[in-house]
Image (spheres, rainbow, N blue to C red):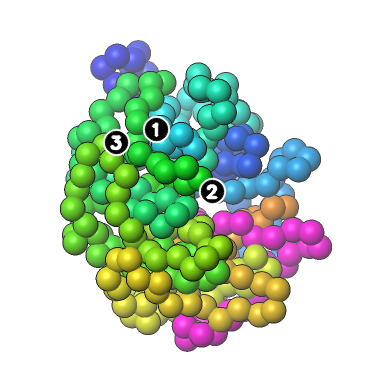
Amino acid sequence: KGEDEDVEVIEKKELLLHFTNLGNIYTQTSSTLTTTHRGGKGSKIKIGDNEVITKTIADDNLGYLLLFSNKGKVYRSAIADLPVDAKINTAQMFEFEPGERITTITTLSRRETTDYFVFVTKNGMVKKTASSEYEMKKGKSLKAINLKDGDEVIAVHFINKEPIGILTFNGNFVIIDTEKINAIGRAAAGVCGIKLNDGDYVIDSKVTTGKYLVTATANGLVKKADIEEFPECTRGTKGKKISGVRKDDRVVKFLTLSQDCDIIVISTRGLIKIKSDELKVASRDATGVTGMKIPEGAKVVDLAKA
């Protein structure tokens, strides 16, 4: 822990951190999941009525959790302080201003190796700032980005020079070179990362290094494609469709893999861990195969590496 905190010995554990639409964080050890063949129903997560998982992060308990609010602020908490196999509401962790809520979370395990924070917003803005500008103490908040009305932080990346991918609700996708984005001040607004059609908005963004790009649709279809089918674009373009989709379905999440491994498909009713080497490499326009059977009224909300 930091110099301002009591030092204690912590046993390292691999965790899954689930963030929900009600602002709750559910923490579970990933060792409690068993690998199954694709197409199964998966195991359940005990969540409340009208509650859905909006983001899942795999990390260990030795790092820090960074929480970003709709007001453009960032908060910090030690992952070891989160209750395991239980939930905690983010409003119990920090003092928010009226109307403020946490909209996305991420972790930073090795801050000393990261040069930049890159923010991606719902309206397609991208901001790159030196990580040294975000020195903060536990429980304190900082202004992370200057947001326009109606905008919010969708993702925050901790990078040196890696490219990032941006996915929109309508399935448009771009990979942009972050080295061509100038670093600016902590409270600045940023530049246009992806050009949006009327009514479209950003739903996901991730660092895109590796060999494969895996996508998941709301109805449980999963596809693995060669990353070379998605060349880098100039920022500020509309991009191309990330995948073919069936009627009444859409791509909701993506991730990139350097090699085949276990991946976790998360729905509003539970999750399943499958092996990515069971997925044949498909074309960019393919729709994918059943990764998880989705019950009526449920949908896939996230995709993560195990």
Find disc 3 in the rendering and name its residue.
187
At numbered mark 2, what does the secondary structure look like: helix, strand or loop?
A: strand
At numbered mark 3, what does the secondary structure look like: helix, strand or loop?
A: loop
| Residue at 56%, 81% in the rendered image | 244
Kind of residue sitting beneath label 1: Val
Find disc 2 in the rendering and name its residue.
56
Quadrant of the frame with the N terminus: top left
Label pair 2/1, CB-CB below 8 angstroms:
no
Label pair 2/3, CB-CB below 8 angstroms:
no
Residue 39 in view: no
Of labels 2 and 1, earlier in sequence is 2
Q: Relative to 54, is 70 above or below?
A: above
| Residue at 33%, 15% in the rendered image | 5
| Residue at 35%, 13% in the rendered image | 6
Span colored in magenta: 280-306
Of the pair 238 and 215, the residue shown nearer to us:
238
Kind of residue sitting beneath label 3: Ala
Find disc 1 in the rendering and name its residue.
74
- Residue 4, given in percent of the width and then of the height, sits at 29, 14
